[in-house]
Amino acid sequence: MINTNHFKDFCEYSKISFTFGDAKKYKEGYLWKVKGKRYREEAGYFGRYCGCLKCSCLFSSCCCCNSSRYWFILTSDFIVYLKDKESNVIEEIMLFDTSFNICHEHKYTGESNGIFIKNSYAEIILKAKDEIEQMIWVKTIKEAFRESDWSTKMVKPFGSFAPERLSNYCKEIIDGKDYFEEVYDALKNAKKVVYISDFWMSPKVYLKRPVALDPNLRDQSSRLDVVLKEIADRGVKVYVLLYKEVPFVCPLNSKYAKEVLISLSPNIKVARHPNELISFWSHHEKILIIDNELVLIGGIDLSFGRVDTKEHPLFDYPDENGLVLFPGQDYFNERIKNFEKVDKPDYSHIDRYSQPKLPWHDLAVKLKGPIVKDFIMHFIQYWNHAIININGSLKDGLNFLYPVFCESTETQEVTSKLTKKPISQKVHLLVKVGKCI
Protein backbone atom coordinates (compact mmCIF):
# COMPACT_ATOMS: atom_id res chain seq x y z
CA MET A 1 0.00 0.00 0.00
CA ILE A 2 1.29 3.46 -0.90
CA ASN A 3 2.04 5.78 2.00
CA THR A 4 0.12 8.87 0.85
CA ASN A 5 2.18 11.26 3.00
CA HIS A 6 5.46 10.01 1.55
CA PHE A 7 3.94 10.08 -1.93
CA LYS A 8 2.87 13.71 -1.49
CA ASP A 9 6.34 14.58 -0.19
CA PHE A 10 7.91 12.93 -3.21
CA CYS A 11 5.56 14.69 -5.64
CA GLU A 12 5.87 17.99 -3.70
CA TYR A 13 2.11 18.22 -3.45
CA SER A 14 0.02 19.99 -0.80
CA LYS A 15 -3.57 21.04 -0.21
CA ILE A 16 -3.10 24.43 -1.90
CA SER A 17 -0.68 23.37 -4.64
CA PHE A 18 -3.11 24.21 -7.45
CA THR A 19 -4.60 27.44 -6.14
CA PHE A 20 -2.04 29.96 -7.37
CA GLY A 21 -3.56 30.78 -10.76
CA ASP A 22 -0.97 31.47 -13.45
CA ALA A 23 1.93 31.67 -10.98
CA LYS A 24 4.56 29.06 -11.81
CA LYS A 25 5.29 26.66 -8.96
CA TYR A 26 9.00 25.87 -8.54
CA LYS A 27 9.25 23.72 -5.44
CA GLU A 28 7.51 22.48 -2.27
CA GLY A 29 8.75 20.70 0.80
CA TYR A 30 9.52 20.78 4.51
CA LEU A 31 12.11 23.14 6.00
CA TRP A 32 12.84 24.15 9.58
CA LYS A 33 12.14 27.80 10.34
CA VAL A 34 14.74 28.74 12.95
CA LYS A 35 13.75 32.34 13.65
CA GLY A 36 12.72 35.64 12.14
CA LYS A 37 9.50 37.42 11.32
CA ARG A 38 8.16 40.72 10.05
CA TYR A 39 9.50 44.16 10.77
CA ARG A 40 6.88 46.14 12.62
CA GLU A 41 6.76 49.92 12.24
CA GLU A 42 4.53 50.04 15.32
CA ALA A 43 7.54 49.07 17.45
CA GLY A 44 8.49 52.73 17.08
CA TYR A 45 11.84 53.67 18.59
CA PHE A 46 12.83 50.04 19.09
CA GLY A 47 12.53 49.38 15.35
CA ARG A 48 12.19 45.78 14.25
CA TYR A 49 10.90 43.00 16.41
CA CYS A 50 9.98 39.41 15.87
CA GLY A 51 6.51 39.55 17.39
CA CYS A 52 7.24 36.71 19.81
CA LEU A 53 4.26 36.29 22.14
CA LYS A 54 6.38 34.34 24.64
CA CYS A 55 8.85 37.07 25.48
CA SER A 56 7.52 40.18 23.69
CA CYS A 57 10.96 40.46 22.14
CA LEU A 58 11.61 43.74 20.33
CA PHE A 59 14.47 42.45 18.24
CA SER A 60 14.57 40.49 15.01
CA SER A 61 16.66 37.67 16.49
CA CYS A 62 14.65 36.22 19.35
CA CYS A 63 16.46 33.91 21.74
CA CYS A 64 13.39 31.92 22.75
CA CYS A 65 11.77 31.35 19.35
CA ASN A 66 12.29 27.62 19.01
CA SER A 67 12.59 26.29 15.48
CA SER A 68 9.57 24.57 13.94
CA ARG A 69 9.06 22.57 10.78
CA TYR A 70 6.81 24.07 8.08
CA TRP A 71 5.73 23.16 4.58
CA PHE A 72 7.19 25.74 2.16
CA ILE A 73 5.87 26.54 -1.32
CA LEU A 74 7.96 28.51 -3.82
CA THR A 75 6.26 30.16 -6.79
CA SER A 76 7.33 32.66 -9.42
CA ASP A 77 6.11 35.56 -7.26
CA PHE A 78 6.39 34.59 -3.60
CA ILE A 79 7.23 32.05 -0.90
CA VAL A 80 4.55 30.83 1.51
CA TYR A 81 4.70 28.40 4.35
CA LEU A 82 2.04 26.33 6.14
CA LYS A 83 2.07 24.27 9.34
CA ASP A 84 1.98 21.14 7.17
CA LYS A 85 1.02 20.11 3.66
CA GLU A 86 -2.57 19.33 4.69
CA SER A 87 -3.20 22.88 5.92
CA ASN A 88 -4.74 25.64 3.83
CA VAL A 89 -3.96 28.42 6.31
CA ILE A 90 -0.88 30.46 5.43
CA GLU A 91 1.46 31.11 8.34
CA GLU A 92 3.36 33.76 6.38
CA ILE A 93 3.96 34.89 2.83
CA MET A 94 7.12 36.55 1.55
CA LEU A 95 6.50 38.38 -1.70
CA PHE A 96 9.33 38.91 -4.13
CA ASP A 97 10.24 42.61 -4.25
CA THR A 98 13.21 44.83 -5.01
CA SER A 99 14.64 44.22 -1.50
CA PHE A 100 14.53 40.44 -1.82
CA ASN A 101 17.77 38.64 -1.02
CA ILE A 102 18.90 35.11 -0.19
CA CYS A 103 22.18 33.68 1.08
CA HIS A 104 23.37 30.52 2.83
CA GLU A 105 26.73 31.44 4.33
CA HIS A 106 27.10 30.43 7.99
CA LYS A 107 28.01 33.98 9.07
CA TYR A 108 24.51 35.11 8.02
CA THR A 109 22.49 32.09 9.11
CA GLY A 110 24.37 30.92 12.17
CA GLU A 111 23.25 27.43 11.21
CA SER A 112 24.68 24.49 9.36
CA ASN A 113 22.58 23.93 6.22
CA GLY A 114 20.97 27.31 6.91
CA ILE A 115 19.20 29.65 4.47
CA PHE A 116 18.72 33.38 5.11
CA ILE A 117 15.87 35.11 3.22
CA LYS A 118 14.73 38.72 3.43
CA ASN A 119 12.52 41.17 1.59
CA SER A 120 11.28 44.69 2.30
CA TYR A 121 9.18 43.69 5.32
CA ALA A 122 10.52 40.43 6.76
CA GLU A 123 13.54 38.21 7.26
CA ILE A 124 13.72 34.54 8.23
CA ILE A 125 16.40 31.91 8.80
CA LEU A 126 15.62 28.40 7.59
CA LYS A 127 17.39 25.09 8.02
CA ALA A 128 17.45 22.19 5.57
CA LYS A 129 17.97 18.56 6.59
CA ASP A 130 21.30 18.34 4.77
CA GLU A 131 23.63 20.28 2.51
CA ILE A 132 22.20 18.83 -0.69
CA GLU A 133 18.68 19.94 0.18
CA GLN A 134 20.02 23.32 1.27
CA MET A 135 21.70 23.94 -2.08
CA ILE A 136 18.66 22.73 -4.06
CA TRP A 137 16.44 25.22 -2.24
CA VAL A 138 18.94 28.09 -2.56
CA LYS A 139 19.46 27.48 -6.28
CA THR A 140 15.72 27.15 -6.96
CA ILE A 141 14.77 30.27 -4.98
CA LYS A 142 17.41 32.31 -6.80
CA GLU A 143 16.12 31.03 -10.14
CA ALA A 144 12.50 31.86 -9.26
CA PHE A 145 13.39 35.39 -8.18
CA ARG A 146 15.64 35.97 -11.19
CA GLU A 147 12.78 35.10 -13.54
CA SER A 148 10.17 37.14 -11.64
CA ASP A 149 8.91 40.62 -12.52
CA TRP A 150 10.40 41.94 -9.29
CA SER A 151 14.04 41.05 -9.91
CA THR A 152 16.72 43.67 -10.40
CA LYS A 153 16.88 42.89 -14.12
CA MET A 154 13.53 44.65 -14.61
CA VAL A 155 13.68 48.42 -15.12
CA LYS A 156 11.58 50.17 -12.46
CA PRO A 157 11.61 53.95 -12.98
CA PHE A 158 11.51 56.45 -10.12
CA GLY A 159 12.29 53.88 -7.43
CA SER A 160 8.98 52.04 -7.78
CA PHE A 161 8.62 48.36 -6.95
CA ALA A 162 6.93 47.71 -10.32
CA PRO A 163 8.09 47.85 -13.93
CA GLU A 164 6.34 49.66 -16.75
CA ARG A 165 3.63 47.51 -18.33
CA LEU A 166 2.64 47.50 -21.99
CA SER A 167 -0.63 46.57 -23.74
CA ASN A 168 -3.11 47.81 -21.14
CA TYR A 169 -6.70 48.88 -21.57
CA CYS A 170 -7.06 52.34 -20.02
CA LYS A 171 -10.26 54.38 -19.70
CA GLU A 172 -10.51 57.76 -17.99
CA ILE A 173 -13.50 58.44 -15.73
CA ILE A 174 -14.30 62.04 -14.84
CA ASP A 175 -16.35 62.84 -11.71
CA GLY A 176 -18.15 60.67 -9.22
CA LYS A 177 -21.44 59.85 -10.95
CA ASP A 178 -19.74 58.05 -13.84
CA TYR A 179 -17.22 56.44 -11.50
CA PHE A 180 -19.91 55.06 -9.17
CA GLU A 181 -21.74 53.59 -12.16
CA GLU A 182 -18.52 51.87 -13.28
CA VAL A 183 -18.09 50.52 -9.75
CA TYR A 184 -21.67 49.24 -9.76
CA ASP A 185 -21.23 47.39 -13.07
CA ALA A 186 -17.85 45.96 -12.01
CA LEU A 187 -19.16 44.67 -8.68
CA LYS A 188 -22.30 43.15 -10.20
CA ASN A 189 -20.13 41.21 -12.66
CA ALA A 190 -17.69 39.94 -10.02
CA LYS A 191 -17.38 36.15 -9.93
CA LYS A 192 -14.50 35.25 -7.60
CA VAL A 193 -12.86 37.96 -5.54
CA VAL A 194 -13.04 41.71 -4.87
CA TYR A 195 -10.35 43.84 -3.20
CA ILE A 196 -11.26 47.33 -1.99
CA SER A 197 -8.93 49.87 -0.40
CA ASP A 198 -10.58 53.12 0.72
CA PHE A 199 -9.85 56.19 2.79
CA TRP A 200 -13.56 56.56 3.59
CA MET A 201 -16.35 54.12 2.84
CA SER A 202 -20.06 54.73 3.38
CA PRO A 203 -21.88 51.38 3.15
CA LYS A 204 -25.25 53.08 2.60
CA VAL A 205 -24.15 55.20 -0.37
CA TYR A 206 -26.01 54.70 -3.69
CA LEU A 207 -23.99 53.75 -6.76
CA LYS A 208 -26.73 54.65 -9.28
CA ARG A 209 -28.39 58.05 -9.46
CA PRO A 210 -30.94 59.63 -9.33
CA VAL A 211 -32.82 58.17 -6.35
CA ALA A 212 -35.96 59.17 -4.47
CA LEU A 213 -35.54 61.96 -1.93
CA ASP A 214 -37.98 60.10 0.34
CA PRO A 215 -36.03 57.17 1.89
CA ASN A 216 -39.20 55.05 1.99
CA LEU A 217 -39.61 55.26 -1.79
CA ARG A 218 -36.04 54.45 -2.82
CA ASP A 219 -34.92 51.49 -4.89
CA GLN A 220 -32.27 49.93 -2.65
CA SER A 221 -30.72 47.66 -5.30
CA SER A 222 -27.81 50.00 -6.11
CA ARG A 223 -26.85 50.76 -2.51
CA LEU A 224 -23.26 49.69 -1.85
CA ASP A 225 -23.98 47.37 1.09
CA VAL A 226 -26.81 45.70 -0.84
CA VAL A 227 -24.57 45.08 -3.85
CA LEU A 228 -21.74 43.70 -1.70
CA LYS A 229 -24.12 41.38 0.15
CA GLU A 230 -25.55 40.14 -3.15
CA ILE A 231 -22.19 39.17 -4.60
CA ALA A 232 -20.89 37.76 -1.31
CA ASP A 233 -23.99 35.57 -0.97
CA ARG A 234 -23.23 34.02 -4.34
CA GLY A 235 -19.70 33.12 -3.22
CA VAL A 236 -17.54 36.11 -4.12
CA LYS A 237 -14.84 36.80 -1.53
CA VAL A 238 -14.68 40.50 -0.60
CA TYR A 239 -11.70 42.06 1.21
CA VAL A 240 -11.99 45.67 2.36
CA LEU A 241 -9.08 47.72 3.73
CA LEU A 242 -10.13 50.95 5.45
CA TYR A 243 -8.25 53.83 7.00
CA LYS A 244 -8.64 53.74 10.78
CA GLU A 245 -9.09 57.42 11.43
CA VAL A 246 -8.46 59.61 14.45
CA PRO A 247 -12.13 60.26 15.33
CA PHE A 248 -11.78 63.80 16.68
CA VAL A 249 -9.99 64.83 13.47
CA CYS A 250 -11.82 62.87 10.75
CA PRO A 251 -15.52 62.00 11.27
CA LEU A 252 -15.32 58.92 8.99
CA ASN A 253 -16.56 56.31 11.49
CA SER A 254 -14.72 53.39 9.89
CA LYS A 255 -15.74 51.25 12.88
CA TYR A 256 -19.37 51.64 11.84
CA ALA A 257 -18.50 50.83 8.23
CA LYS A 258 -16.69 47.66 9.31
CA GLU A 259 -19.56 46.55 11.55
CA VAL A 260 -22.08 47.01 8.74
CA LEU A 261 -19.97 45.17 6.16
CA ILE A 262 -19.00 42.13 8.24
CA SER A 263 -22.64 41.69 9.31
CA LEU A 264 -23.66 41.17 5.68
CA SER A 265 -21.85 37.90 4.95
CA PRO A 266 -18.99 35.71 6.23
CA ASN A 267 -17.47 36.18 2.77
CA ILE A 268 -16.80 39.86 3.53
CA LYS A 269 -13.61 40.56 5.50
CA VAL A 270 -12.65 44.04 6.70
CA ALA A 271 -9.37 45.34 8.14
CA ARG A 272 -8.72 48.84 9.48
CA HIS A 273 -5.25 50.35 9.54
CA PRO A 274 -3.07 51.74 11.13
CA ASN A 275 -3.06 49.87 14.43
CA GLU A 276 -1.77 52.71 16.60
CA LEU A 277 -4.20 54.51 18.89
CA ILE A 278 -3.16 57.86 17.39
CA SER A 279 -1.33 58.30 14.10
CA PHE A 280 -0.41 61.43 12.22
CA TRP A 281 -0.81 60.03 8.72
CA SER A 282 -3.53 58.34 6.72
CA HIS A 283 -3.66 55.72 4.04
CA HIS A 284 -5.40 57.56 1.23
CA GLU A 285 -5.84 54.92 -1.45
CA LYS A 286 -9.01 54.37 -3.45
CA ILE A 287 -8.58 51.05 -5.25
CA LEU A 288 -11.07 48.46 -6.49
CA ILE A 289 -9.82 45.17 -7.99
CA ILE A 290 -12.29 42.74 -9.54
CA ASP A 291 -11.49 39.05 -10.15
CA ASN A 292 -7.77 39.86 -10.53
CA GLU A 293 -8.60 41.20 -14.00
CA LEU A 294 -9.89 44.77 -13.64
CA VAL A 295 -8.82 47.79 -11.58
CA LEU A 296 -10.60 51.03 -10.81
CA ILE A 297 -8.32 53.56 -9.16
CA GLY A 298 -8.34 57.30 -8.61
CA GLY A 299 -9.24 59.97 -6.11
CA ILE A 300 -12.88 59.08 -5.45
CA ASP A 301 -13.93 57.37 -2.21
CA LEU A 302 -16.97 55.10 -2.10
CA SER A 303 -18.55 57.50 0.35
CA PHE A 304 -20.99 60.32 0.83
CA GLY A 305 -20.20 63.61 -0.86
CA ARG A 306 -18.16 62.15 -3.73
CA VAL A 307 -20.86 61.84 -6.39
CA ASP A 308 -21.11 64.75 -8.78
CA THR A 309 -21.79 65.33 -12.45
CA LYS A 310 -19.78 67.23 -15.03
CA GLU A 311 -22.23 70.13 -14.68
CA HIS A 312 -21.48 70.39 -10.92
CA PRO A 313 -24.92 71.77 -9.94
CA LEU A 314 -25.04 73.92 -6.83
CA PHE A 315 -28.65 72.99 -6.03
CA ASP A 316 -30.58 69.73 -6.32
CA TYR A 317 -34.34 70.13 -6.14
CA PRO A 318 -36.60 67.06 -6.51
CA ASP A 319 -37.96 66.56 -10.03
CA GLU A 320 -41.59 65.77 -10.87
CA ASN A 321 -41.01 62.17 -9.74
CA GLY A 322 -39.41 63.16 -6.43
CA LEU A 323 -35.93 62.09 -7.60
CA VAL A 324 -32.66 63.78 -6.69
CA LEU A 325 -28.99 63.22 -7.48
CA PHE A 326 -27.76 63.95 -3.95
CA PRO A 327 -29.95 62.44 -1.19
CA GLY A 328 -29.32 62.83 2.54
CA GLN A 329 -25.63 63.07 3.46
CA ASP A 330 -24.67 63.46 -0.22
CA TYR A 331 -26.05 66.99 -0.22
CA PHE A 332 -23.25 68.65 1.75
CA ASN A 333 -21.05 71.71 1.92
CA GLU A 334 -17.98 71.50 4.14
CA ARG A 335 -17.57 75.27 3.86
CA ILE A 336 -20.84 75.62 5.76
CA LYS A 337 -20.80 72.51 7.97
CA ASN A 338 -18.56 69.46 8.15
CA PHE A 339 -19.82 65.88 7.97
CA GLU A 340 -21.30 64.43 11.14
CA LYS A 341 -23.46 61.44 12.11
CA VAL A 342 -22.19 59.55 9.05
CA ASP A 343 -23.92 56.41 10.35
CA LYS A 344 -27.22 58.15 9.51
CA PRO A 345 -27.36 58.25 5.69
CA ASP A 346 -30.45 60.48 5.50
CA TYR A 347 -29.19 63.11 7.88
CA SER A 348 -29.16 66.57 6.27
CA HIS A 349 -26.19 68.85 6.92
CA ILE A 350 -27.66 71.86 5.18
CA ASP A 351 -30.97 72.98 3.73
CA ARG A 352 -31.11 71.93 0.07
CA TYR A 353 -33.71 74.59 -0.71
CA SER A 354 -31.68 77.58 0.51
CA GLN A 355 -28.02 76.54 0.76
CA PRO A 356 -25.80 75.39 -2.13
CA LYS A 357 -23.95 72.07 -2.11
CA LEU A 358 -20.18 71.90 -2.55
CA PRO A 359 -19.16 70.70 -6.05
CA TRP A 360 -16.76 67.75 -6.09
CA HIS A 361 -14.48 67.35 -9.10
CA ASP A 362 -12.21 64.31 -9.31
CA LEU A 363 -11.13 61.54 -11.65
CA ALA A 364 -10.30 57.86 -11.84
CA VAL A 365 -9.14 55.32 -14.41
CA LYS A 366 -10.28 51.85 -15.34
CA LEU A 367 -7.47 49.43 -16.18
CA LYS A 368 -7.16 45.94 -17.61
CA GLY A 369 -4.09 44.04 -18.68
CA PRO A 370 -0.65 43.26 -17.21
CA ILE A 371 -0.73 46.33 -14.93
CA VAL A 372 -3.39 44.62 -12.78
CA LYS A 373 -0.71 42.27 -11.46
CA ASP A 374 1.07 45.16 -9.74
CA PHE A 375 -2.11 46.36 -8.05
CA ILE A 376 -2.80 42.86 -6.76
CA MET A 377 0.72 42.58 -5.34
CA HIS A 378 0.38 46.00 -3.70
CA PHE A 379 -3.01 45.24 -2.12
CA ILE A 380 -1.90 41.82 -0.87
CA GLN A 381 1.24 43.27 0.70
CA TYR A 382 -0.76 46.03 2.36
CA TRP A 383 -3.52 43.67 3.59
CA ASN A 384 -1.04 41.20 5.05
CA HIS A 385 0.65 44.04 6.91
CA ALA A 386 -2.60 45.62 8.15
CA ILE A 387 -4.09 42.45 9.68
CA ILE A 388 -1.21 41.99 12.12
CA ASN A 389 -1.72 43.34 15.63
CA ILE A 390 1.09 45.18 17.42
CA ASN A 391 1.87 42.01 19.42
CA GLY A 392 2.38 40.03 16.21
CA SER A 393 -0.89 38.06 16.28
CA LEU A 394 -3.44 38.18 13.48
CA LYS A 395 -6.64 40.17 13.90
CA ASP A 396 -9.66 38.02 14.68
CA GLY A 397 -11.11 36.20 11.69
CA LEU A 398 -8.50 37.50 9.22
CA ASN A 399 -5.81 35.53 7.42
CA PHE A 400 -2.94 36.23 5.07
CA LEU A 401 -3.75 36.47 1.38
CA TYR A 402 -1.63 35.34 -1.54
CA PRO A 403 -1.92 36.75 -5.06
CA VAL A 404 -3.64 34.80 -7.82
CA PHE A 405 -2.89 36.20 -11.24
CA CYS A 406 -4.85 35.84 -14.46
CA GLU A 407 -3.01 36.19 -17.75
CA SER A 408 -4.62 39.18 -19.49
CA THR A 409 -2.57 40.79 -22.25
CA GLU A 410 -5.24 41.65 -24.76
CA THR A 411 -4.56 45.08 -26.26
CA GLN A 412 -7.55 47.37 -26.63
CA GLU A 413 -7.61 50.94 -27.82
CA VAL A 414 -9.76 53.46 -26.01
CA THR A 415 -10.39 56.94 -27.33
CA SER A 416 -10.01 59.82 -24.90
CA LYS A 417 -13.18 61.89 -24.51
CA LEU A 418 -11.01 64.96 -24.08
CA THR A 419 -8.46 64.67 -26.89
CA LYS A 420 -10.22 62.19 -29.22
CA LYS A 421 -6.88 60.40 -29.48
CA PRO A 422 -5.96 56.90 -28.29
CA ILE A 423 -4.87 56.78 -24.67
CA SER A 424 -1.32 55.52 -24.12
CA GLN A 425 -1.34 51.88 -23.17
CA LYS A 426 1.97 51.96 -21.31
CA VAL A 427 1.13 52.15 -17.61
CA HIS A 428 3.39 52.31 -14.58
CA LEU A 429 2.24 51.86 -10.98
CA LEU A 430 4.45 54.17 -8.92
CA VAL A 431 4.19 52.83 -5.38
CA LYS A 432 6.93 52.35 -2.80
CA VAL A 433 6.60 50.17 0.24
CA GLY A 434 4.89 52.22 2.90
CA LYS A 435 4.49 55.18 0.55
CA CYS A 436 2.30 56.19 -2.37
CA ILE A 437 3.49 58.76 -4.88
Image (cartoon, helix red, strand yellow):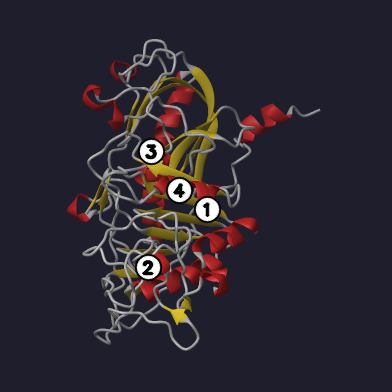
Q: What secondary structure is found at the residue carrying circle 2?
A: helix
Query: Answer yes or no: do the residues labelled 2 and 1 have beta carbons within 8 Å?
Result: no
Whichever of labels 3 and 2 marks the residue nearer the N terminus, that label is: 2
Residue type beneath disc 1: Val
Whichever of labels 4 and 3 marks the residue nearer the N terminus, that label is: 4
Residue 209 in the image: above or below residue 65: below
Whichever of labels 2 and 1 marks the residue nearer the N terminus, that label is: 1
For residue 20, say whether it is visible. no
Q: Is residue 272 left or right of residue 259?
A: left
Query: Residue 82 occupies which quadrant of the picture?
Result: top right
Whichever of labels 4 and 1 marks the residue nearer the N terminus, that label is: 1
Task: Classify 10 Å Cα crowding around label 4: few (below 14), some (14-19), many (20 and above).
Answer: some
Residue 71 in the image: above or below residue 325: above
55 or 264, which is in the foreground?
264
73 or 345, which is in the foreground?
345
- Name the residue tied to disc 1: 238
Q: Is residue 430 left or right of residue 81?
A: left
- Name the residue tied to disc 2: 330
| Image location of residue 77, percent across then percent down | 42, 45
Residue 326 in the image: above or below residue 147: below
Residue at point 77% right, 29% down?
2
Residue at point 32% right, 33% down?
277
Query: Answer yes or no: do the residues labelled 4 and 3 have beta carbons within 8 Å?
Result: no
Mark 3 vs mark 2: in front? 2
48 or 349, which is in the foreground?
349
Residue type beneath disc 3: His
- Name the residue tied to disc 4: 256
Mark 4 vs mark 1: in front? 4
Q: How many marks?
A: 4
Which mark, by number, is residue 385?
3
Per the model, the C-alpha gap separating discs 4 and 3 is 22 Å
Residue type beneath disc 2: Asp
